[in-house]
Amino acid sequence: MSDRPEGQGTPEPAAVPPAKKPAGANRSRLFREITGVGLDWRSALLVPFLAIITALFSALVFLYRDRGHGTRMVKALTIRVGLSISLIAFLLLSYWMGWITPQGLR
């Protein structure tokens, strides 16, 4: 037992309000419930980035091989621009949905 009389002890800590969740937290949880998949963000961002770099270097190779007399370089650069726009759109959507935050990935 304690040496202190009953009722005299350390005071109970005050109730702490629950932490606020970010606005997109429910949408992110909903995505995981619907798809059953927790995305690996590093691979989800790394794969398109590597595809963009690959398209850029293939355009360089086509520039060297075709000596400016072909359309393969233009097609490779068009694919690179499309992939870049898609990646930026995906990042904006992810931020809006609350999947990523300015502090990092969840």
Image (tube, rainbow, N blue to C red):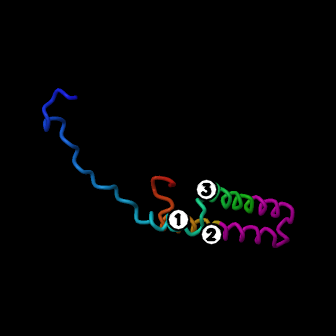
Q: Whole-percent x and y of residue 48?
A: 67, 61
Main SS category, magenta section: helix
89 or 15: nearer the viewer: 15
Which residue occupies 40% across, 61% down? 22
In primary-sequence order, the first of circles 1 and 2 is 2
The answer to if 41 sits in the magenta stretch is no
Q: Quadrant of residue 47?
A: bottom right
Residue under label 1, please give it: 94
From what the image shows, is residue 13 above or below residue 88? above
Label 2 packing within 10 angstroms: few (<14), some (14-19), many (20+): few
Residue under label 3, please give it: 40
Range of the magenta residues? Answer: 57-83
Callout 1: SS: helix
Q: Whole-percent x and y of residue 86?
A: 62, 69
The residue lying furthest to the top in this view is 3
Q: Quadrant of residue 33?
A: bottom right
